[in-house]
Image (cartoon, rainbow, N blue to C red):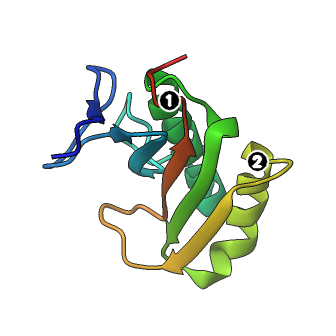
Amino acid sequence: MIPFRETVSSPGLPVHGPYSPAVRAGGLLFVSAQPGVDPATGTVPDGGAAAQCRQALRNLEHVLRVAGADLRDVVRTTVLYTDLADLPAINAAYAEAFPADPPARTAAVVGLAGGRLVSIDAIAAIDPTGPR
């Protein structure tokens, strides 16, 4: 076991399976994929892939905040989406969250459960001594 590994969890971070919302290891924070689903209602927002991308980024931001980080700390993301035709709308929504110096990114077309169109995970660089 890594001696500096810490699971990040909170009652406000929903988990729907055998995984952690985030794990802090050394100077990195690994955030599990966040779907474009409103955690308060369990529904996907109206507005297609762009709206779901914005919601996924809000969810990601919430997990980062609980861990003592924010979107400025993100160094890499993976954007999973269901339809290649949605990429321009996803890119536009993504650029709103990362308007300058965006993180490295991988994007892939995949199948997502429950009517989800977008899901985003992240790696953030953080202070290894704990939350700020």
Determine the residue located farthest toward the right in the rendered image: 100
Q: Secondary structure at mark 1?
A: helix
Q: Label 2 amino acid?
A: Phe
Q: Label 1 amino acid?
A: His
Residue 62's disc is: 1
- Residue drawn where x is 57% and y is 37% of the image: 58
Determine the residue located farthest toward the top in the rendered image: 132
Q: CA distance from mark 1 to mark 2?
A: 15 Å
Cβ–Cβ under 8 Å for marks 1 and 2: no
Left or right: 113 as drawn, with respect to 1? right
Taking 11 as reference, is 39 above or below it? below
Q: Nearer the viewer, residue 115 or 111?
A: 111
Looking at the figure, which quarter contains the C terminus?
Answer: top right
Specify the quadrant of the image occupied by residue 16.
top left
Q: Secondary structure at mark 2?
A: loop
Q: Nearer the viewer, residue 27 or 102?
A: 27
Left or right: 118 as drawn, with respect to 11? right
Residue 116's disc is: none
| Residue hosting label 2 | 98
- Residue drawn where x is 41% and y is 40% of the image: 26
